[in-house]
Amino acid sequence: MKKHSNEKDELTDKRRFSYRMNVFFFASFVIFSVIIVRLAFLQFVEGPELSQEEASNITKDVPLPPVRGTIYDSTGEVKLAYSKPIQSLYLTLYKNYGDVDGKPSPNIGEVQDIATRLHDVFEQYKLKDSESLTVEKIIEEMDLNSRKANGFMPRLIKSDLSEEEVAYFLQHKDEFKGIQIVEESVRFYDPDTVAVQTIGYLKKFRSSKSLNKYKEVDEANKTQTDPGLVYTENEFVGFDGLELQYQDALRGKSGYTSVDVDLRNLPEGVAGSTPPEKGYDLISSINKNVQMKTEQAILDQLSWLHRNPVSGRLHPNAKTGFAVAMEVDTGKIVSAASMPDYDTNVWRTGGISNEDYDKIKYIYQNGTIRGFPPDDTGKRAESVVLLGSTIKPLSVLIGLKEGFFTTNTVYSDRGSTTFGGDNRRVQNSSGHVYGAMYPRDAIRHSSNVFMIDEIGKKLYSKYGAKGVDVWDEYMEKFGLGISTGVDLPNEWLGRKEYGEESVESSLTKLVYASFGQQGKYTTMQLAQYTTMLANKGKRMEPQLVKEFRDSEGNVVEKVKPKVLSTVEFNDAYWNEVQRGMATEVSAFSGFPYDFARKTGTSTQVVGGKLVDNGVFIAYAPRNNPKLAVAVVIPEGGFGSSSAAPVARAIFDAYDEEFGLDGVPKKDKNKDSESESGTQ
């Protein structure tokens, strides 16, 4: 009986154990099933959302605009372009006010309220005659759908706040969640309009992407890891002149505020801030005093040509003038004038009205380095002209180098010559007959027939059609038809009419090229060529910058003179040409220095009529040259009457500031006045 009971108990225990095991395994199965289902749900359902949330819950950098460096004149004291601080109102959106499924946000009422309250404040403190900022415009600037910038980026609502507006918003900051007063800078230019086309101007980055430089910057912005190099859409950038050429140096680096961003790409808080780095200051080679006198001399001369007959007639179409003054030893550009000019401050807001653009559209480009055609309305003449007789010193050098004649060769000038199978006839200006002459006399008298008989015809006789290529090689060696290397953007290389397809024969091209009627070049190219005549063959790089300085005034880089290339000629050839550059020029009456010069009058067709352009080149002093000058007055008549007076004013201004003999006359005059005062 007891045995039977034990067996029964044992069977019961086994059943209990089996039941417990089944319950355990079932419970384990359920738990593991739940875990697996949960993991699958996390991976396939919530995974993408969690990954986005993880990626979004990071710190992002909001750029702060950089402080642009100043452009000074050569003294390092006169500011030609500089930035002033202004206060701007920015608004950060802490809610998603954008459209939802194509419909306005349910929070749009808050947007209307914010914009209306901002509008009311702006109206309260609006200056008389200033433009109102409408509610609609404010909402547009708020960029609710983040089309212009990411959701966490502050929106620029208004720039250049008045002191009253700044005080109001600082006092009522708690009433406008997300507003921030940010100090920015706005660009100003010397109101005396100093070398404005050379200095250049700024535009907003968003409207500057037509330039390749800013297309590249825009692409780089997408992957830029250094927040200091990120450009914002409203940032001002150089669009022309030195402002564009040295954009990277002048710009400095953006500062940035580190912002914690949530899943909605909206800001949660500020983690820290790094201030902007100021760009380098640029010390230009332009001397304000010399530049201003150059500009005024051109304007005075244009006015004179409208009132006084030259060669028996007035020149009312002489509307523009260009001049470049270049130091012979350094290549530094002391003045570069493209006149008339304008007030660059018209670009201060980063754009320009149609009305203002119409006023400046024919004069805002730099005519000393660019070629543009005459304007149909008569407001602008062509910026590049045939060189006329200013090419003759080079023509004689070519003839001497090629062995066509020597410095002692005597040529008999009969006043005219013929060429080609049809005996086409060309004569000297006014048909002058100069008789027996040396090569130097041909330059001084500006003999067309010498250049034709002794250079043009002989190049064709020696090389045939290849003579045009030989001529072109010489032109390029003297910087005509190639880049001068000047540190300005968009330089035009000139127009080699002798190299163009035409019905003219190679002989005809060489004949006309020999006395300056087959190539149009910029005033900058003409100045570089003149410098080579002065220093006997060194092609100096034209430079508009002397040095760069940091925000503390320390010099970080000095720009050294650069010789781009040299040409080798017998010293006797250089001396012969220099002796020939002695044309009588009444504008230099009483000039205290011996100087080398060449007048030029080029004739070309404009609007179906023949016009004469005034061209003049010179360097001084003759035997120890310091300054080379080139002046072009399109449609101004003879160079001796139209362009030479401008050159005289430039030499006088340089002598006053620096001294053509190394002694600045302004200092000498001060000493004389001081001595007179003590007697």
Image (tube, rainbow, N blue to C red):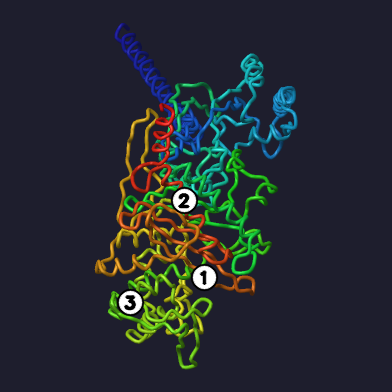
Q: Secondary structure at mark 1?
A: strand
Nearest-to-viewer mark from 1 and 2: 2
Which residue is the site of mark 3? 399
Mark 3 → mark 2, Cα distance in angstroms: 32 Å
x%, y% of residue 419?
A: 45, 88
Q: Residue at x 32, y 41 (%)?
A: 558
Q: Residue at x 38, y 62 (%)?
A: 529
Please tell me which of labels 3 and 2 falls first in the chain.
Answer: 3
Which residue is the site of mark 2? 650
Please tell me which of labels 1 and 2 falls first in the chain.
Answer: 1
Horizontal relation, residue 489 to residue 117: left or right: left
Please tell me which of labels 1 and 3 falls first in the chain.
Answer: 3
Horizontal relation, residue 227 to residue 322: left or right: left
Report if the CB atoms under discs 1 and 2 are less than 8 Å apart.
no
Report if the CB atoms under discs 1 and 3 are less than 8 Å apart.
no
x%, y% of residue 539?
A: 33, 59
Dot 1 surroundings within 10 Å: few (below 14), some, or many (20 or more)? many
Which residue is the site of mark 1? 602
Res. 466 in view: no
* Quarter location, residue 549: top left
Mark 1 → mark 2, Cα distance in angstroms: 22 Å
Res. 87 in view: yes
x%, y% of residue 247?
A: 45, 43
Q: Secondary structure at mark 3?
A: helix
